[in-house]
């Protein structure tokens, strides 16, 4: 008789996984995740961030089981079966099978630049890789031996990972095939598309903070204790106790802090940009053999799962150590990363208004046209001297407040749900939930060119009516007085009244 297998996880301790999950783990398609860094280029900045998608996937599979079992024990009337539990655990385990080299760098930077207009995301590849994993390892019989109904449960697992199988079905009242509407809450465990509160985040908050050396202020174990299913508008949703609303805001604040301090680190991002450039230059010459001996490029490997199984972070080292003349340009970029000869950070800014900046080549061209008129530098710069990175920061749902989509229940009646507005929680919560950060880099290492580029950048911020870069008074003191609003920032009485430590007393009559 098969028994549960114990894994010693550095975050969750000793965790038990079902034998079917172990069968899935012991396949080449799943083992591939050992060679894909969870945080991509962030590892080049944070030495502890060496963890991979493999251990994160184990953690999500475990937490998915914890949550669905807690709901089953708390509410037997939900009729959660062993089949349901197993499918939710498998979905959690396999949700990241489709990640490419350096995780989000691949689908967020490399693919959009290499194949513009190609609509692809790693969740799509995760579904295809899961199908390939089951078929190529002949696990259909093993799944059936654990009482899984192959077509129905396969659909359920894939839908939890990638959403409805049939896009046209999204218009219907119930778009899913794997489970009926009565079990709608099961689709909110692994990847919650309603509000973003799911076990995937619970694991990566804890795991990434552990490896980054950053304090994690969110405790998923507490939230687990106050989670239950309630019916809202004839559909069952996972709901949270009303007193946990502050905890949820802390959760999304933690997410935002992780992005600011680690995931979108200015040096980690430029390293990913440089790796992306290297991969672009290598793309035409790097061949990966897929099914039937057909050859694929880095940018097309996801079209064949046999080829994609071979595509991991290892291509970085293959390019770095190659002797192929065609890979010379790509190799030189990676050598620069190894020697820390990185593109120089010039500064960051934000749009003053809520207009959305679209990242394209015209941004670099517009900076190159912004040579300062006052005491201009002797250096003439071109668009290729600049790299612009536009980063969207939010709470997970763009400009929307994700907590507005959470249903809460009260102690007095745990079956009735309520919405809790931001005003009911605290006046210190954010007013907006999304913003853009524009970072500018210079490709030259020459100190004279970098100094001139910083002046170009500050002149560009003045012209575009962007916010004042933090070091602008130091690097270009002759330019900053040209923008009156930048001078007024320190003298605004409303701004000073809101600053910490201000002793001005405001009364209702003011």
Image (cartoon, rainbow, N blue to C red):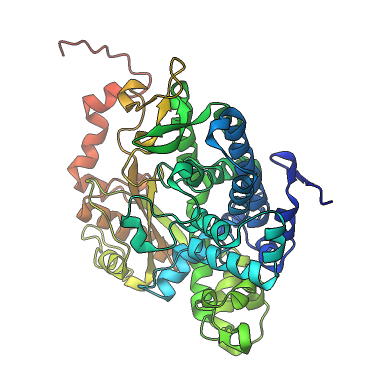
Q: Nearer the viewer, residue 354 or 290?
A: 290
Q: From the viewer's perspective, is 153 left or right of 455?
A: right
453 vs 194: above or below: below
Q: Nearer the viewer, residue 243 or 35?
A: 243
Residue 212 appears in the picture as rendered: no
Q: Residue at x 61, y 31 (%)?
A: 221
413 vs 191: above or below: above
Q: Nearer the viewer, residue 354 or 397?
A: 397
In the picture as drawn, the residue positioned furthest to the right comes out as: 1
User: x%, y% of residue 43?
Assistant: 61, 55
Q: Residue at x 48, y 64 (%)?
A: 124
User: x%, y% of residue 341?
Assistant: 55, 65
Q: From the viewer's perspective, is 119 left or right of 431?
A: right
Residue 377 appears in the picture as rendered: yes
Q: From the viewer's perspective, is 219 left or right of 232?
A: right
User: x%, y% of residue 260?
Assistant: 46, 45
Query: Which of the 4 image quarters holds residue 384?
Result: bottom left
Q: Residue at x 58, y 45 (%)?
A: 204
User: x%, y% of residue 397?
Assistant: 37, 45
Q: From the viewer's perspective, is 27 left or right of 479?
A: right
Quadrant in the picture for the C terminus: top left
180 vs 406: above or below: below
Query: Which of the 4 image quarters holds residue 108?
Result: bottom left
Q: Nearer the viewer, residue 73 or 506?
A: 73
Q: Residue at x 61, y 70 (%)?
A: 132
């Amino acid at each position: 008789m098969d028994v549960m297998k114990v894994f010693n996880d550095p975050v969750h301790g000793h965790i038990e996984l079902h034998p079917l999950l172990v069968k899935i783990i012991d396949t080449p398609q799943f083992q591939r995740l050992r060679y894909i860094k969870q945080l991509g280029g962030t590892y080049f900045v944070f030495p502890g961030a060496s963890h991979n998608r493999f251990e994160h996937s184990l953690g999500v599979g475990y937490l998915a089981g914890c949550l669905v079992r807690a709901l089953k024990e708390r509410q037997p009337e939900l009729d959660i079966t062993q089949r349901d539990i197993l499918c939710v655990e498998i979905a959690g385990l396999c949700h990241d099978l489709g990640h490419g080299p350096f995780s989000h760098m691949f689908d967020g930077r490399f693919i959009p630049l290499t194949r513009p207009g190609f609509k692809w995301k790693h969740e799509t590849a995760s579904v295809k890789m899961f199908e390939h994993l089951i078929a190529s390892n002949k696990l259909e019989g093993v799944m059936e031996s654990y009482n899984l109904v192959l077509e129905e449960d396969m659909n359920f697992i894939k839908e939890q990972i990638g959403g409805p199988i049939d896009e046209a079905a999204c218009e219907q009242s119930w778009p899913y095939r794997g489970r009926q509407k009565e079990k709608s809450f099961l689709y909110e465990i692994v990847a919650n598309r309603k509000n973003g509160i799911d076990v995937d985040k619970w694991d990566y908050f804890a795991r990434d903070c552990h490896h980054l050396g950053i304090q994690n202020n969110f405790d998923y174990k507490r939230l687990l204790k106050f989670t239950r299913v309630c019916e809202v508008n004839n559909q069952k949703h996972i709901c949270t106790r009303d007193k946990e609303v502050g905890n949820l805001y802390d959760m999304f604040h933690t997410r935002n802090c992780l992005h600011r301090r680690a995931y979108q680190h200015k040096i980690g991002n430029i390293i990913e940009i440089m790796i992306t450039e290297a991969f672009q230059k290598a793309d035409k010459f790097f061949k990966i053999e897929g099914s039937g001996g057909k050859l694929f490029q880095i940018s097309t490997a996801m079209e064949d799962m046999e080829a994609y199984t071979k595509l991991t972070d290892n291509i970085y080292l293959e390019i770095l150590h190659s002797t192929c003349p065609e890979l010379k340009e790509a190799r030189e970029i990676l050598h620069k990363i190894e020697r820390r000869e990185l593109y120089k950070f010039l500064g960051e800014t934000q749009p003053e208004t809520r207009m959305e900046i679209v990242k394209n080549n015209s941004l670099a061209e517009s900076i190159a046209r912004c040579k300062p008129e006052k005491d201009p530098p002797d250096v003439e710069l071109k668009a290729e001297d600049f790299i612009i990175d536009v980063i969207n920061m939010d709470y997970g749902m763009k400009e929307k407040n994700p907590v507005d989509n959470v249903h809460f229940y009260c102690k007095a009646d745990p079956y009735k749900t309520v919405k809790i507005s931001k005003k009911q929680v605290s006046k210190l919560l954010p007013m907006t939930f999304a913003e853009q950060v524009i970072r500018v880099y210079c490709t030259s290492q020459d100190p004279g060119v970098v100094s001139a580029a910083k002046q170009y950048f500050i002149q560009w911020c003045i012209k575009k009516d962007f916010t004042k870069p933090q070091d602008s008074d130091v690097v270009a003191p002759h330019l900053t007085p040209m923008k009156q609003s930048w001078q007024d920032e320190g003298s605004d009485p409303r701004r000073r009244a809101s600053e910490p430590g201000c002793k001005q007393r405001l009364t209702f009559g003011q």
